[in-house]
Amino acid sequence: MSDQQDAGRDQTPDATADEMRDQPTGPDQPARRGLSRRGFFTGAGAGVVAGALAAGGGTAFAMSHGEDDATEGVDFNNSYPFYTGTHQAGIQTEPQRYCVYMTFDLVSATATDLQVLLARWSAAIAQLMQGKPIGAVAPTQPNAVAPDTGEAYNLGPSSLTVTLGLGPGVFDHRFGLADKKPKLLEPLPALPSDQLQKGYTGGDLSLQACADDPQVAYHAIRNLARMGRGTVGTRWTVMGFGRASAGKGQSTPRNLLGFKDGTRNIKEQSDFTDHVWVGDGDVAWMRGGSYQVARKIQMNIEIWDADRVSDQQQVIGRTKNVGAPLSGNAEFDTPNFTAKDAAGDIKIPVTSHIALAAHENNNGVKILRRSYNYTDGISQFGQLDAGLLFIAYMDTPQSFIQLQEKLGSSDLLNEYIGHIGSGIFAIPPAPAQGHYLGEALFG
Ligand SMILES: C=CC1=C(C)c2cc3[nH]c(cc4nc(cc5[nH]c(cc1n2)c(C)c5CCC(=O)O)C(CCC(=O)O)=C4C)c(C)c3C=C
Ligand SMILES: [Fe+2]
């Protein structure tokens, strides 16, 4: 690691050495908390993802921003525990800056192969989340092939979380696990405005690796895919940057439309209990788990960029700079969906994105959004190929279906986006020490 990277990773200008040593750890608690968010060196910015990858790590650089920014500091030494015995990390965890999402097809039809893979992946994920390699990077035996590919060596845990999902295919005729199938795990139905492409859809297993260093997230997925060879084959992947959602202690970031995204995301513990974590109503082994819906949503960026900001605000239902609902003044003002202006017009259009998606207008339905921006470069038509890797967690997939049936039919945003990829997965709870993800399936 270069001196510059070392400086970015280990120096915390306004935290003392004692503060750094004495932070509490526990389920879903980072190993080090309480470090000042401001005054830090920041991690790699969204616009330099490719550069950071090419440079071989999270670029550390000092920047000055205005007051209304989302530049919380990054502690590359922060880690989360894997063996919590409760919920998997990477859901309630404050969103990290980068995400590599990949789905896999099971190419072996033997339940034992699946069982061994889940056990080996679990052990490896636990190591990776502590910032450790999954075996020797440079074996002493000169003819040996290295178990770990090495590109994350010494980069620090970087808040890595790896979240595993089980798709509907795990419970089909192949593995004898049909009686263990989560009650609500079915392929998503066709939804209005779907433009799904086979190359970005489906999968028997999913891995969501999130970290504050893109290379740490990529290393995790690369090595887990490598371990899976012979049992799984890769299906589709998206690399996400610039978290497009906010956790409880975080400021709200912006998506590629330039709007704050995540203002009214789920943040309170009671909402996680009521809307995200599976309770007693499902198969017993899913208790503490969740359902994950992933959508690759392409944006027609050039068309959006040509639109007047006043119109963009009508589409979203919020102001672009502050992120306030059109019925209010400040970002966290509660939207008033019946408020009218002096001319008698509804202030938040009824077909705006937030009016259609808000829980007040959907019988109380709420989902946890944990999305990331993505770019695939330039399309065959010479246009920017970019969008949102929409990832959501919920206690029933019906919540997403209900919202998307409405959004897909009427959302003003549909002129500017297209859902091109899709996947649905059951998220098992996290194992306790000595156990592995999905172990209850094989009892
Ligand atoms: C089916 C669920 C949703 C999809 C798909 C979706 C796509 C999508 N959203 C944005 C941008 C924003 N979304 C915002 C709010 C918001 N979105 C959903 C659901 C889906 N979005 C919900 C439930 C909400 C909260 C509504 C509320 O309670 O007010 C916002 C506003 C800021 C915020 O509260 O987060 C933006 C901006 C894009 C660009 C997009 C697809 C590309
Ligand atoms: Fe949205």
Image (cartoon, rainbow, N blue to C red):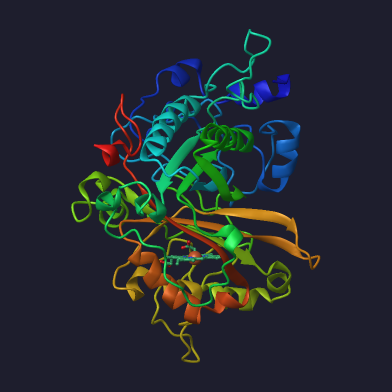
Q: Is residue 395 visible in this depiction of the protein?
A: yes
The spot of residue 136 in percent (x, y) is 58, 16
Between 8 and 195, the residue placed more toward the observer is: 195
> Above or below — where is 37 with respect to 103?
above
Q: Residue at x 72, y 21 (%)?
A: 2
Q: Quadrant of residue 291?
A: bottom left
Between 292 and 330, the residue placed more toward the observer is: 292
Horizontal arrangement in the rendering, residue 385 relative to residue 280 (left or right): right
The spot of residue 423 in percent (x, y) is 48, 58
Of the 4 image quadrants, the one containing the C terminus is top left
Residue found at the very far bottom of the displayed protein = 343
Residue found at the very far right of the displayed protein = 382
The spot of residue 347 in percent (x, y) is 48, 81
Between 114 and 384, the residue placed more toward the observer is: 114
Q: Residue at x 69, y 76 (%)?
A: 307
Of the 4 image quadrants, the one containing the N terminus is top right
How many discs appear?
A: 0
> Above or below — where is 339 with respect to 225?
below
